[in-house]
Image: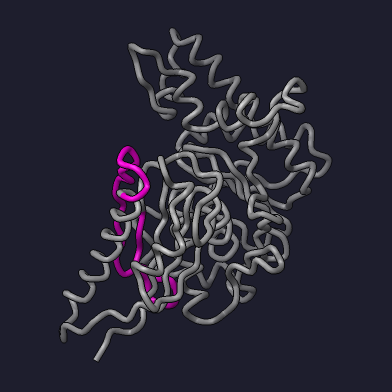
Amino acid sequence: MSHPSVVLGIDFGGTKIAAAVCDLAGNKLADAVVDSQAALGARACFEHGVKTAKGLLAGIADNADDGSAVDLAAVGVATFGIPYEDRVELAPAIDGWDSWPLGRELRSAFPGTHIRMATDVKAAALAEARWGSLIGADPAIYLNLGTGLAAAIVSREQVLLGSHGAAGEIGYYLRQRSDVGLPTGSRVLLEDMVSGQGLRLRASTAQQQMTAAEVFAASTGPDDVELEALVEDFVNELAFHVVNLAILVNPARIAVGGGMTRSWDRIGPTLTQALRAAVPYPPELVLAHFPHEAPLLGAVALAVDAASNNIATIALSNGHYRANRTNNASTRPSGNLPAGTPQATSHSG
């Protein structure tokens, strides 16, 4: 006798790896978050993630009354960068990840199991379109403010990939007119300035290293004029590009997720004011329903789709991911989402 079928979601991030085992409806049975071991390189990161995921599966089997094996129906994986069978493009965060044969290694680690992969921000947008704050919004934008900076566009319940899978990679935006004609290695990328990593590097000195959250917290003090100016510049540059993105897409709603939303009280009001002032038809601005877990939940959604043969996942032939048309707020996975998942959407606009 075997367990009912389960799916596995893994989110490979630049600083952490998250994994969850869920039933075929996406309800969580077990989950874990571990350090990515980025300093050790691609192989160590991948093996640590797989070991963590297999540990979750083993734990479920050990807890079974009859000791039966777990039937793993599918694995969904989200990653920074654009995943392929033999590489991951635009993935500088971990040494060697760009040449890591992610698809092949996943098939080797989970033989005979359906595998689906997606860029983390697009996976996050899929989760928000299916279960979260982008339900019913057409078109919509998911904006990720984390270690890096990226966006995803949702239209007609689909997450746009682009011709090379790079739609929404706004971290590569030009910042000024003098950037025109310069290759990426010869100019400062938007992500280098407007991201958690960028803010950390801008604020830190040889004597004091600061996280992005610490920069935001310290900038509110009466004696931190330089940090206050840095945060103001950071938020204003972000608003400049979000406004232009909103003018291009004309979204009904923008949902913002990622670790930097912990400083939403400093970011949200400026974005809201900028959108209302400059966009002909200002969109609703909301916090993501899953501000910190959306990539993992998107990986789970990919696995659920693969397991159920409901083709709502990667379709490179037409350049889209597809969100399940039948899902709405009432069909979110009930109660057993990964630990820490918020149960309500915060609105700021």
Which of the 4 quarters of the picture holds residue 186?
top right
Above/below status of 260 relative to 82: above
Q: Position of residue 225 (x, y in %)?
A: 50, 9
Q: Residue at x 68, y 53 (%)?
A: 153
Above/below status of 58 relative to 118: below
Above/below status of 4 relative to 136: below
Q: Residue at x 44, y 28 (%)?
A: 212
Most extreme residue toward the right is 280
Q: Quick check: can you spot residue 261?
A: no
Task: Quadrant for the N terminus, please.
Answer: bottom left
Task: Quadrant for the C terminus, please.
Answer: top right
- The stretch of residues the image draws in magenta is 18-43
> 325 left or right of 46?
right
Q: Position of residue 264 (x, y in %)?
A: 52, 36
User: Is residue 106 found inside the magenta-colored segment of the image?
Assistant: no
Which of the 4 quarters of the picture holds residue 112?
bottom left
Q: Position of residue 29 (x, y in %)?
A: 31, 70
Viewer-proximal residue among 88 and 298: 88
Viewer-proximal residue among 99 and 247: 99
